[in-house]
Image: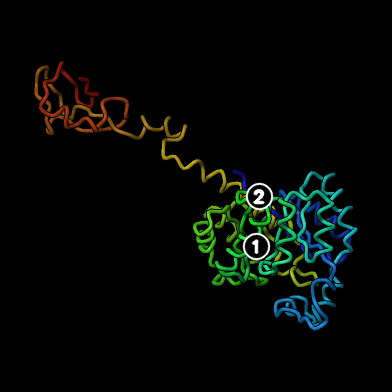
Amino acid sequence: MKVLIIAEAGVNHNKDIDLAYKLVDAAKSAGADVIKFQAAIPSEVVTEEGIMAPYQISNSKREESQLEMSKRLTLDLRVYKEISAYCNQKNIIFAASSFGKKATEYLSTLNIPFWKIPSGEITNLPYLRQIAKFKCPVILSTGMATLGEIEFALNILERGGVAHKDITVLHCTTDYPAPLDDVNLNAMKSIAEAFQVAVGYSDHTNGIEVPIAAVALGATVIEKHLTLDSNMEGPDHMASLEPHEFTAMVQSIRNIESALGNGIKAPSNNEIRTIPIVRRSIVAAVPINDGELFSEKNLTVKRPGIGISPLKWDQLIGRKASRSFKRDELITW
């Protein structure tokens, strides 16, 4: 199955609609399947007392309330209808994470293909129930979560009407950028084993190595932040890939998909053509007379592998030669 690659635009548009359109273009050009934004009404999400995360302060190089930051970076909900239409025009899937009841209801009018639940909402019971009522596919991010919290969210979604087969759980480390020694990529396999669900990986590390490794470990979805310039002001740009980097990641993932194959251990078509060239046959080590007994002294094995296989060695030893053989001649029964 083809890995679904999501370009996370998030708030990397910096509340500039033209920049949002450019991110759509960049995602399409890079080969992403989906471009995803974040839809919210800031006052629905955070109080005036909410503080910025340390990485947000560090990456933004400013300190303000989380509400102020959100207002500065959040597009008006109505803009997403235009962005969705633009994505349709560019033949790339539009998606968005919703933060809050009104944003969720608005996104439900845009015919999105799945609901992407962000890591911070995995313990938000009313939100999970609201998402579940749409009975649509769900991609659930699990940054900061324990297996118990993942189980809680899955139970709420399934009780609300989301089919188990329609849920994909993304392993994630909520830090921007995430240190490699915090990634714990094997936790993705633990999630798959614990809940028998499709799994993927939402990546916040620098570079492209970790999402590629995740695909090799069985990820069916990869989500990675995209920016036009990692030096732009904003909380997520530093942990995002620029277009040329995102393109390299997509190409590498597609290569890994091809290399993974179907899991059946058998010769490839090219190997089948190579077998007679590199395998060996039983041949005469010295001239052999008609009626002479085959032995370890007068037989050996050499290329090409177009005669009797060395696997038949024990069956030949002690038999009479049916005719004479020259040195290096292929033995026949």
- Of helix, strand and loop, which one carries label 1? strand
Of 96 and 297, the residue lying toward us: 96
Mark 1 or 2: in front is 1
Q: Residue furthest front?
A: 159
Q: Name the residue at 19% across, 31% down.
A: 313
Q: Name the residue at 81% across, 51% down.
A: 25
Q: CA distance from mark 1 to mark 2?
A: 15 Å
- Work out whether mark 1 precedes mark 2 in sequence or the reverse, and give the earlier one: 2
**In the visual, does 325 lie left or right of 67?**
left
Vertically, is 248 above or below 142? above
Crowd band around label 2 with a 10 angstrom C-alpha radius: few (<14), some (14–19), many (20+): some
Disc assigned to residue 141? 1
Of 331 and 115, the residue lying toward us: 115
Q: Which residue is mark 2?
A: 4
Q: Name the residue at 54% across, 52% down.
A: 218
Query: So how many labels did they put on this image?
Result: 2
Disc assigned to residue 85? none
Vertically, is 93 above or below 68? above
Give the image location of residue 281, x and y in percent: 27, 29
Give the image location of residue 84, x and y in percent: 84, 51
Of 23 and 222, the residue lying toward us: 222
Q: Amino acid at mark 1?
A: Ser
Give the image location of residue 154, x and y in percent: 61, 60
Q: Are marks 1 and 2 in contact (CB under 8 Å)?
A: no
Give the image location of residue 294, x and y in percent: 12, 26
Crowd band around label 1 with a 10 angstrom C-alpha radius: few (<14), some (14–19), many (20+): many
